[in-house]
Image: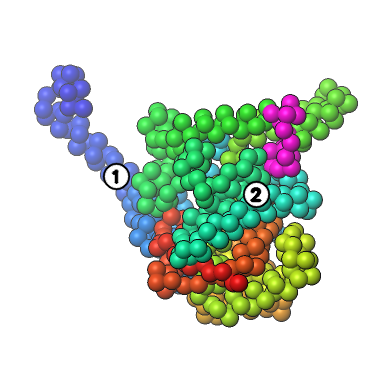
Amino acid sequence: MLRVLSGLSLTKNSILILVSTSLVFVSTSIFLKWLRMCHHFKKRKIPGPRPIPILGNFHHIIKRGMPYNDLAMIKKYGKTFGYFEGSTPVVETTDTQLLKSILIKDFNLFINRRVIEAINFEPFDHFLTLIKDDEWKNVRAILSTMFTSGKLKSMSELMINCTNELNKHFKNLTDGDGIFYVRDYFGGLSLNVICSCCFGFSIDSIKEPKNEVIVHIKKFFFDSLTKDPKFILLILFPKFANFLRQKNILEIIPKDSMNYLKALISEIIERRKNKLEFRDDFIQTMIEHEQIMTEENKSLPESEKKLSKTLSPAEIFSQAVMLLLAGYETTANTLGFIAYNLATHDIYQEKLIEEVDNVLSNYNGKISYESISEMKFMNMIIDETLRMFPPAIRTNRIASQDYEFNGMMIEKGQMVVVPIWALHYDPVIYPNPEIFDPERFNEENKRNRENSAYMPFGIGPRNCLGMRFALIEIKLALAEILSKFRFERCERTPEKIEIDSSGLARPKKPIVLRIRNRF
Ligand code: HEM
């Protein structure tokens, strides 16, 4: 820089004046921006903490971790408050009436989610989770055809193959000391299920964690949203991060892994289109939808043809990667937390085993889509675990118009964050929220609670599309495991689970348990 300036044949004095003028200019703009930030929420009658220049209030999230920061802020500022992530204003609320309005009643004014500029490129730009307005409505309608009861029933057969494999691995474990890391086994199961139902191929990621496909797929998973400098940059300086990405200085997903997966999926799509292979899975449904639409198009007048929406191969690839990201870790972590809750609460584990045995005795011991739907106590165990450990700590919506609620103004373009975790720990709704109590989810207690007080899968028209898929997978796995084994604590089992600051509900210390043969 100095060399450039001296190339302009400036004297030392003029360089000094130039540098100090720039410094004064930069610090004045930072100061003025900070002043505006300090008044931003006051003007809109929304309480909240005072921001600091550049970081806003993001340093609290980094320091405390996302769920614990949400709880601390609610305690201090009430159910609805405003704060800054860098210079981005955020409104956060656990007010169940406001949540109901935003997520259900006035959903048409809050259809979209936040999109971080630097990750708005292929394949992320077509993700159902990130697309907007009419494009979202179209694609959601297409993808919903993959989750009908008929399709789910059919896919449950693929899931059962995976849970059978998991039980073989558990059997091998019980020949030794039975001690295992839940992440390795349930992460493996979840990846096997997603690959089988979504990408259309079978793998055994528990036996072969170093398999080429698995190694590339794992590169798509981000490590820690609030510790990784790359993601802090994305949140705090989205424009700068986008610039660095476009200049190939910041790599979000390694190129070799992206190209590998693209080639793999393109090959699968080609084979399916040429009818060389058939499998009743997500990719097949997306391709068939395209073929049905193409056939229908033939009979339409030219002017109407473009109205029919089909997914291009690039969009199919994009949705396949999205389903992997949305479905892998969420389901794996849930199974891990359930196993932990069962191992540490004997009474509930025995009650659940009794239910599994009773129901299966009516089905000749066969675990199936039908038999698991009769396991009601299992639902209560899953619901309470998802209350305590909702895998998505937060979700969000963007206001498409100015919106007034109880004298508060939510402006057009404002992001509203729903802190799912913090909502589930509201002691007024869930007394002693730290305690695992499946009875919170018996029919009577459920009836007496607002729907918007429990949302591990979100609520409203843009809730989790894979909810039923995930619940079937979890129930099939639990029934399979508990029909033969039980979970126990071991010396390395943590006394209490703390969540790391990754932005997803990941345990800080790995969960280690023992599995024992029941017979
Ligand atoms: C225990 C497992 C899971 C949990 C707790 C979970 C939770 C969530 C949550 C909280 C949302 C945001 C909802 C909202 O904003 O209202 C979401 C969205 C979504 N999830 Fe899941 N999820 C799970 C598993 C899955 C699976 C297995 C799939 C697919 C195979 C999936 C696909 C999706 C999709 C596509 C969306 C975006 C929906 C849209 O924008 O229209 N999820 N999920």
Residue 134, image quadrant: top right
Which part of the image, by quadrant, shows the N terminus?
top left
Mark 1 element type = helix
Q: Amino acid at mark 1?
A: Thr
Q: Amino acid at mark 2?
A: Ile
Q: Which residue is mark 1?
A: 28
Q: Is residue 149 above or below residue 425?
A: above
Q: Seen in the image, is 149 located left or right of residue 208?
A: right
Q: In the rendered view, how is the structure colored?
A: rainbow
Residue 168 position within the rendered picture, expressed as x and y whole percent measured from the top left: 58, 56
Which numbered mark, 1 or 2, is in the foreground of this view?
2
> Which circle marks residue 111 in the picture?
2
Which part of the image, by quadrant, shows the C terminus?
bottom right
Q: CA distance from mark 1 to mark 2?
A: 37 Å
* Residue positioned 42% across, 61% down in the render: 510
Q: Seen in the image, is 443 located left or right of residue 24?
A: right
